[in-house]
Image (cartoon, rainbow, N blue to C red):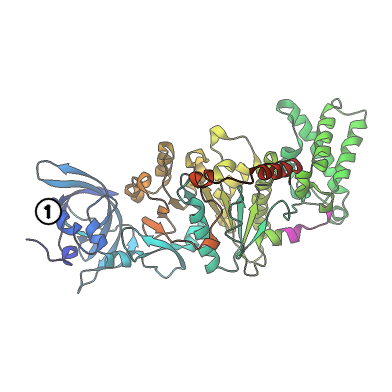
Amino acid sequence: MQAAPGENGAQPIGVVLEISGAGSQVAIDLQRLGECSEDEDPSVAMAGQVGSQIKIRVGNNWLLASVRNQKQDRKAGSILANIDFLGEGVEEKLTGRLHGFRRGVTRYPVPGAMVYPASTADLKQVYASDGRSAVTIGRVYPTKDIRAGLYVDAMLGKHFALLGSTGTGKSTSAALILHRICEAAPEGHIVMVDPHGEYSAAFRQTGVILDVSNLQMPYWIMNFEEHCEVLLTSNGNDRQVDADILARCLLKARQKSRLAEQMGKITVDSPIPYLLSDLSNAIQDAMGKLDKATNSAPYMRIKNKLDELKTDPRYQFMFSGMLVADTMSDFISKIFRMPANGKPISIIDVSGVPSDITSTVVAVLSRLVFDFAIWGREEKTTPILLVCEEAHRYVPSEQNANGNSVGTILSRIAKEGRKYGISLGLITQRPSDLAEGVLSQCGTIISMRLNNDRDQDFVRAAMPEGARGFLDAIPALRNRECIICGEGVAIPIRVSFDNLEEIKRPASEDPSFVELWSQSGGEEDIVQRTVQRWRSQG
């Protein structure tokens, strides 16, 4: 008996064979699959296929599940499929539809229970916002008109990660999500570390762009560990000797400040302004003493490095003589957008920062977020979102770890930041190169296409059980499509991202080789101008 068009959703397509805690096995009728595939409703047309949703009646409830895999059952002429349970909703008596959906399962079906396709109307109920504030970022696959929403509070409250191989539209998707958050919260506090200078084009209207020309980051804001990273060049036992000398001299230089005199007790980590010349003189004095424990080599190493930083124009944004005034409050207000004045995001473009101190600059910014939250516990909580592009460079896995302070502070934010109102957003193309503990702390994972097997396995390990079926689709995603699972969504979903207007897109478009290689003219001037900029390092 063939079901009339439009009635496919009301007719069963299969039967439950066996049940286990997280999922179960069902048998699906091949003939019914063919009938459903011609249905006008795209959700019913997809029913029974890998990645689609089906529902099972249990008493007065509907249980929603997603199909993980299929294989042919030669004996019965049907298809065997494994399914993962997503949640349950109440059955509406008149229409038989599902409403009041919630995650988790209270009652399981018994073998022999009928399996039905989930219609677009059912899925609308499932994906409908449950009253929490949400931002929409695209439409749910395979439907034509269901909007995919992210619950902002749940997503930011437990950190999130955006993963995807190069060229899948990761930067544009990150810009889209951040634009939507900025629209929903125009007085927010978002700090984004941008290592390639891609995002300044996307946030000219809604944010403040800070790079080496206007960042003016005071060197004295660094703590002792960060000073060591910048000023010490030695390794092994020598490094410990150098660090002891630097600690003594740095404390002396900090104590010379008028601010330190008012405060009484300060440590080597206190962000008290000091003069570079005071540090230099303290090293010189210590070197001249006869009762010093070592020869003069360690003192000379530190002093030479200090002189190099003062004279090298590339370090001017941090080590210029102008940065001695007590600008800490202004610097923090500027970076954390307090007040936001309608521009809630600050893009910190570190592409112009010399590569040997890039990670230290990111460490200082991340630590400022953390320390500000800790010392501001008495005040009204002001949550801050810290977004890290190319996160695998800063929080590398154990085998790639180089002991930088940035990995330590970002790992700490991932583990403890939630208590202090700090949210972490990690964007990376190599999740397998990320520290494992950090990815597992992300409550929401937004995964675009990943081409590498190791990366796919790594994400699979970090995702919750019910999303496993979706994960098999990661290599098959199109550009600007993703799978979202975790706290930020009602159930795991596959989403096609919205188009972003040209003006809001990051400058990360791939160049067209054929087009650019078929034009000619002006190359000599380009080379000369480039060499000029290269030489002046500006």
Q: Residues within 10 Å of mark 1 (few under 14, many from 20)?
A: few
User: Magenta residues, as a range?
Assistant: 324-331
Horizontal side, residue 96 vs residue 457: left or right: left
Helix, strand or loop at label 1? It is: helix
Which residue, given by chain and number where applicable, does mark 1 sit on? 31
Is the residue 439 above or below the residue 47 in the image? above
Residue 43, percent across and down? 26, 60
Is the residue 170 above or below the residue 136 in the image? above
Inspect this view and state whether residue 103 appears.
yes
Inspect this view and state whether residue 264 appears.
no
Q: Amino acid at mark 1?
A: Gln
At 53% across and 50% down in the image, what residue appears?
Answer: 426
Residue 130 image-quadrant placement: bottom left
**Magenta stretch encompasses residue 130:** no
At 39% across and 49% down in the image, what residue appears?
Answer: 464
Q: Main secondary structure of the magenta part?
A: helix
Residue 367, percent across and down? 66, 50
Residue 257, percent across and down? 87, 51
Residue 282, percent across and down? 88, 39
